[in-house]
Image (tube, rainbow, N blue to C red):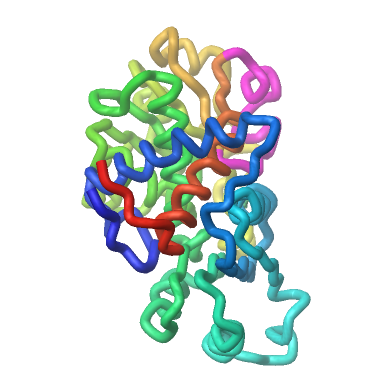
Amino acid sequence: MTFNHKHIIGIKDLTPEELTFILDTSISFKEINRRDIKKVPTLRGKTIINLFFEASTRTRTSFEIAGKRLSADTINISASGSSVVKGETLEDTAKNIEAMNPDAIVMRHNASGACEYLAKRLDCAIINAGDGMHEHPSQALLDAYTIREAKGKIEGLTVAIIGDITHSRVVRSNIYCLTKLGAKVRVAGPGTMLPPGIERLGCEAYKNIDDAIKGSDVVMMLRIQRERQGAPLIPSVREYSKFFGLTHARMKLAKEDAIVMHPGPINRGVELPTSIADGPQNVILDQVENGVAVRMALLYLACGGEKLQD
Ligand code: CP
């Protein structure tokens, strides 16, 4: 098949076939990432700008490594070190960057819809690295890749996503991605962090973590997105941990071979104890490794690596 999307804004825009195509394309990039010599010439001569208006460890580093392993020139811009601090608007910042002829801008922004806003105004490819509470498509794809790798399939699995559902872009992208690929998705969180009508996205909503975890193949834990909430925090961190933190007793409700996932950063002792975060069922660092391969596939497809045929 051919992949004809200029921008990658959200999983909502992609078909199940396109999602599977991205995951399949990522397999060969993972193989490259495990070689001694990890660099390939695929995007030689292309320029990729990472434009980050929010903090990031995994996504930013992963996109940078992905671009460099594909031989693209990769430039990182943090809003805090740019002329944004002097009052320059998003549109002016992006248009000035575009005047230097990059092939793609990978952007993280605190405003939901910021990537779509730029995609409508710029000619180069825009890749969403997380926009507000909206979507985090590359995270959902690396999660899907990791689930498929660990369980051998996605279709027919039950995935429980637990925590601050309201403020998480990861959960939205994962609901779209995993349901399109045939999984059943359950979400659970405190009433203040479980948006009414979330079921309309195609998931089941629970107010009790035990009910959500029971019989699941995958347990994905989320941190409280403190940066998107005012004070005071309701529930408190202690209440969140007590009622929605993962414990060994709760893990026993999941299938015996269930895996534990977390997009990071982890708040150890809040949503996950270290004994589970580092325990035998966790695939958290596999998620991080797979993120590089998936982002190589996204850059390859968005930056006009030759059209792939199957
Ligand atoms: N999962 C994720 O987006 O992590 P970072 O915020 O560190 O990029």
Q: Is residue 180 visible?
A: yes
**Against 178, is 6 above or below?**
below
**Above or below for 22 versus 49:** above
Q: Position of residue 105 (x, y in %)?
A: 53, 70
User: Who is closer to the viewer here, 33 or 148?
Assistant: 33
Image quadrant in which you'd find residue 245: top right
Please name the residue shown 32% across and 49% down the image. 308
Q: Give, as a single range, the part of the protein colored magenta.
A: 263-280
Q: Residue at x 36, y 29 (%)?
A: 159
Q: Based on the displayed image, in which of its 4 quarters is residue 301 positioned?
A: bottom left
Q: Name which quarter of the figure residue 284 lies in.
A: top right
Residue 251 horizontal side relative to residue 268, left or right: left
| Tag count | 0
Residue 166 spot, x, y in % from top left: 43, 53
Q: Nearer the viewer, residue 34 or 137?
A: 34
Q: Nearer the viewer, residue 90 or 198?
A: 90
Residue 156, horizontal then vertical, whole percent: 24, 24
Placement of the C terminus among the 4 image quadrants: top left
Give me the residue at 53% from left, 13% from top: 249
Tell me residue 289's x, y (percent): 60, 35
Residue at image point 36% right, 36% down: 24
- Examine the rendering and report whether any part of residue 233 can be seen: no
**Magenta span contains residue 92:** no
**Outermost residue to the right:** 81
141 vs 284, left or right, is left
Left or right: 198 as drawn, with respect to 142: left
Magenta segment, principal secondary structure?
A: loop
